[in-house]
Amino acid sequence: MRIVYTVLNGRIAGGQVVCGQFMLAAKQAGDEVCLVTPSLGEFTSLLEEESVPIVQLPMDRTFHLHRAWQFARFLKQWRADLVHCHASVTGSILARFGAKMAGVPLISHVHIENKFSDLSWVRSLQVWLDNLSAYLTDEIVAISEDTRSSLISQGISSDKVRVIHNGISVSDEIDGKSVDWARTALGIEGEVPVVGTVARLCPVKGQREFILAAKYVLNEFPNATFAIVGEDLEFDGSYRYELERFSGKLGLDGCLKFFGFQHEAARLIYAFDIFVLPSWIEGLPVTILEAMAAGKPVIATPVGGVPELVSEGETGLLVPPRSPEKLAEAIGYLLGNSNVARSMGMSGRERVVEYFSEQTMLKQVMTMYREMAKTI
């Protein structure tokens, strides 16, 4: 088959990572693949290294309906057999209409609860267009039961939506070399406890709460180090500057470090003793899966599909969003109870192996591809 994939943008984020897993698996299976994206970035650079064709087409504005026609024209020219869309609401709407005009089947992969405009009339129109275009899809895939429920609540038929959880590759075992490499890469010396988070820098990922929690925790554990891995993709660096200034005002220079974007963020998680993701909203975070696979206890918020990953008291702890005090309390508890933390980390790793492996996810998607190929 000839499969076209679409994404939100060319940067590296959870949805792009999952899309990349599918593209490379399809390519390995003998399919021809192509990526359509509004912009270039680290993600597209990685795919170019794998000889994946990249096409730029700005499908990121709801009412630029002429882009749907341009997308349809491209699909015909490229002789596409299938579209697998991983874009946000705006890109999904345009891709769905474009695929329908081109007569090409489309899978719409939804990575988080849909977010619409704050303007009521624009929001109403976006919801209407999203629900309408949903009926044009051949399959809608939600990455969690929570995401599926949100789509049904929005007005999309439950018969249209199936759940395929994100999955990641898990190494056969964890060795000390992985930890040593990660700590060296982050410049961490000695046996100090490390608490880290990995996510793009933006308010909804909770880095501000993470910084405040660090201030509280350091009163009890003054030798702890806090690490923030991730880049400011949405505010052109201004939000990172704001966070760094905030950290400095709290007197955390030297105790809390910003590491920016890292190509090997998943490997760097091995440097942490505790992984934290205090998001306000989520889908099914790949970073939590990576932390669990690395055998790290997870402290997160019970938003989106996170409770489907983190079993309270078994693989980690769940705290209310926007609550740095509760977050600090949970971090302090695990720092003070290393045996409990270690047990949670191992239980999390076992959970990923059993329920959230890359092999399971890819098998479900490849089966869906082959089923759809029979109808083409």
Image: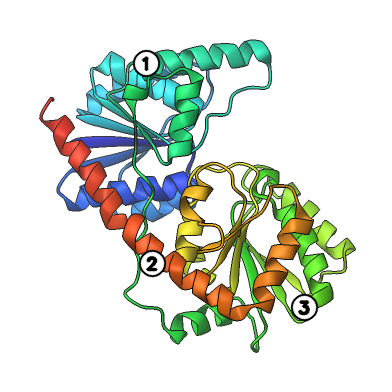
The location of residue 60, given as percent across then percent down, is 51, 27
Question: Does 337 appear above or below 30?
Answer: below
Q: Indicate left or right for 272 with 291 as reference.
A: right
The location of residue 305, given as percent across then percent down, is 50, 44
The location of residue 275, given as percent across then percent down, is 58, 65
Q: Are marks 3 and 2 in contact (CB under 8 Å)?
A: no
Q: Residue at the spot x=43%, y=30% of the render?
A: 57
Name the amino acid type tagged 1.
Trp
Q: Residue at the spot x=18%, y=41% of the render?
A: 367
Question: Does 271 appear above or below 18?
Answer: below
First in sequence: mark 3 or mark 2?
A: 3
State whether residue 295 appears in this view.
no
Q: Residue at the spot x=78%, y=70% of the render?
A: 217
In the structure shown, which secondary structural element does the residue marked by tag 1 occupy? helix
Residue depth check, mark 3 versus mark 1: number of the one nearer the observer:
3
* Residue that mark 2 sits on: 350
Name the amino acid type tagged 3.
Phe
Mark drawn on residue 69: 1
The location of residue 260, given as percent across then percent down, is 63, 61
Residue depth check, mark 2 versus mark 1: number of the one nearer the observer:
2
In the structure shown, which secondary structural element does the residue marked by tag 2 occupy? helix
The local crowd at label 3, few if under 14, some if 14 to 19, many if 20 or more residues have their Cα within 10 Å, is some
* Residue that mark 3 sits on: 221
First in sequence: mark 2 or mark 1?
A: 1
First in sequence: mark 3 or mark 1?
A: 1
Mark drawn on residue 279: none
Name the amino acid type tagged 2.
Glu
